[in-house]
Image (spheres, coloured by chain):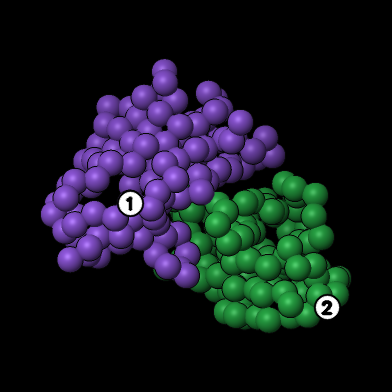
């Protein structure tokens, strides 16, 4: 079983649409959860952390369900600039005095004019 | 401010040739450093991490090795490249504020022919 699984995508949506990404993780001991954004041929960058109570940052809303080991990201009123690949990321203890991130394969979003 | 540099940005190498990729970090001391590879159509795979000078942990058996000769320098090497070593190589470190965001370098795009 893959450690972090995401919708395969790609998602092609018109401007202004609402789009939702889902993610599941296999390690119940995972400590923290994130969504990263990766533009084409660029490095990933943190979009937002995901908290159990749910959190919102402008048009972006993230949810976490620890019991189901499920994470989601909702983007409202999609903009052309939202086009990118969205990576679901889970943090765990490396057991060697550090932490490790495990990345999903990512879901590509294309927002169409 | 914290910055991370990688070079070269792009590299085309023949099968069987050696490899050396360099990563340096500024604005932080004793960082935990990471090497990832992102192959076409695949997610980020953690290759190595280092919690200090001379300390290397390997995540997957492979054709590559890593070294940390200085506190803020992390090197990825190979004696003989394989076709399967092609990919986008990313170096990363944890931000100063907490273990809640990894910052990535701009990456090296390696093509092995």
Residue B77 pos. (x, y %):
77, 68
Q: Is residue B59 visible?
A: yes
Residue B71 pos. (x, y %):
67, 64
The chain whose colour is green is B
The chain whose colour is purple is A
Image point (58%, 61%), residue name = B40
| Residue A2 - label | none
Which residue in the structure is indicated by mark 2?
Answer: B17
Q: Secondary structure at mark 2?
A: loop
Q: Is residue A103 above or below residue B16?
A: above
Q: Nearer the viewer, residue A107 or A70?
A: A107
* Among the 4 quarters of the image, the one containing residue A33: top left
Image point (16%, 58%), residue name = A15
Q: Chain of mark 2?
A: B
Q: Is residue B26 visible?
A: no
Residue B89 pos. (x, y %):
61, 65
Between the C-alphas of marks 2 and 1, the distance is: 39 Å
Q: Is residue A89 above or below residue A84?
A: above
Quadrant containing the N terminus of chain A is top right
Q: Nearer the viewer, residue B70 or B84?
A: B84
Which residue in the structure is indicated by mark 1?
Answer: A11
Q: Secondary structure at mark 1?
A: strand
Q: Chain of mark 1?
A: A
Nearer the camera: disc 2 or disc 1 = 1
Image point (33%, 36%), residue name = A72
Residue B42 pos. (x, y %):
57, 54
Image point (57%, 79%), residue name = B9
Q: Residues within 10 Å of mark 1 (few under 14, many from 20)?
A: some
């Amino acid at each position: 079983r893959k450690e972090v699984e995401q919708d395969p995508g790609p998602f092609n949506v018109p401007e202004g649409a609402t789009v939702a990404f889902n993610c599941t993780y296999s390690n119940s001991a995972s400590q923290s959860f994130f969504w990263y954004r990766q533009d084409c041929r660029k490095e990933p960058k943190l979009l937002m952390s995901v908290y159990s109570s749910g959190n919102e940052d402008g048009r972006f809303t993230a949810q976490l369900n620890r019991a189901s080991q499920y994470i989601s990201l909702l983007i409202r009123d999609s903009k052309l600039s939202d086009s990118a690949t969205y990576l679901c990321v889970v943090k765990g203890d490396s057991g060697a005095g550090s932490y490790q991130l495990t990345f999903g394969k990512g879901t590509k979003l294309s927002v169409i004019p | 401010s914290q910055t991370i540099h990688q070079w070269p940005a792009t590299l085309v190498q023949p099968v069987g040739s050696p490899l050396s990729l360099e990563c340096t970090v500024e604005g932080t001391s004793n960082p935990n450093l990471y090497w990832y590879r992102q192959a076409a159509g695949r997610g980020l795979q953690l290759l190595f991490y280092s919690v200090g000078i001379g300390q290397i942990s390997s995540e997957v058996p492979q054709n590559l090795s890593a070294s940390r000769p200085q506190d803020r320098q992390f090197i990825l090497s190979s004696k003989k490249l394989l076709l399967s070593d092609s990919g986008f190589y990313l170096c990363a470190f944890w931000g100063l504020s907490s273990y809640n965001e990894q910052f990535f370098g701009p990456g090296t795009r390696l093509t092995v022919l």
